[in-house]
Amino acid sequence: MLEADFGLARGVYNSEYYKVHGEDFLPLRWLAPECIMEGIFSSKSDIWAFGILMYEIVGLGQKPYPNMSNNQVLVHVKNGGTPAKPAYCPDQLYKIMQSCWAFEKEQRPTFADVLSMFEKLRDKIEFQQHTNEKR
């Protein structure tokens, strides 16, 4: 599985970025607690950001923490808060997202774990597309 550090990408919307250390501005709404509080980045913080990406996909592009200012997001995440469940998000998928957002990084899954979770979902009847149409 290929993973990329999207958290280090720079953009033009500075109001969405947070200065962690030095001159680096990072996208606040995608940062794991340890990134915000300690400036520590790892595959576990990448998993957090992947959970946020899933939120954006299921939320049809909705910005994470849509009704919060950057300062509110900082306090929310530092206090263990995570994004609310998007409308139309299946419970099983939200459980995967929540596992990615475990406050303690050691409790977050690996990318291999997430793949396994998706494979289990794929096997459930409610996640399979059934059609009687002939092609």
Image (cartoon, rainbow, N blue to C red):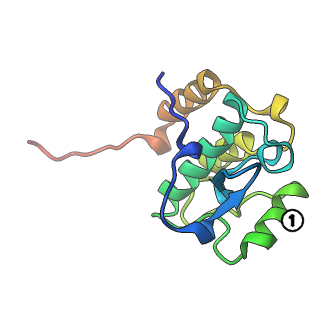
Q: Residue at x 85, y 43 (%)?
A: 38
x and y, in percent, of residue 24 in the image: 66, 50
x and y, in percent, of residue 9 in the image: 51, 47
Which of the 4 image quadrants contains residue 44? Answer: top right
In the rendered view, tell whether residue 67 sits above or below residue 94.
Answer: below
* The one of 20 and 124 positioned closer to us in this rendering: 20
Q: Is residue 39 visible?
A: yes
Q: Residue at x 54, y 64 (%)?
A: 88
Helix, strand or loop under label 1: helix
Q: Looking at numbered disc 1 in the image, what kind of residue is underneath it?
A: Val
Q: Residue at x 80, y 72 (%)?
A: 72
Neighbour tally class for label 1: few under 14, some 14-19, many 20 plus, Cα within 10 Å: few
Q: Residue at x 47, y 64 (%)?
A: 61
Residue at the spot of label 1 = 75
In the rendered view, tell whether residue 129 sits above or below residue 68.
Answer: above
Which of the 4 image quadrants contains residue 74? Answer: bottom right
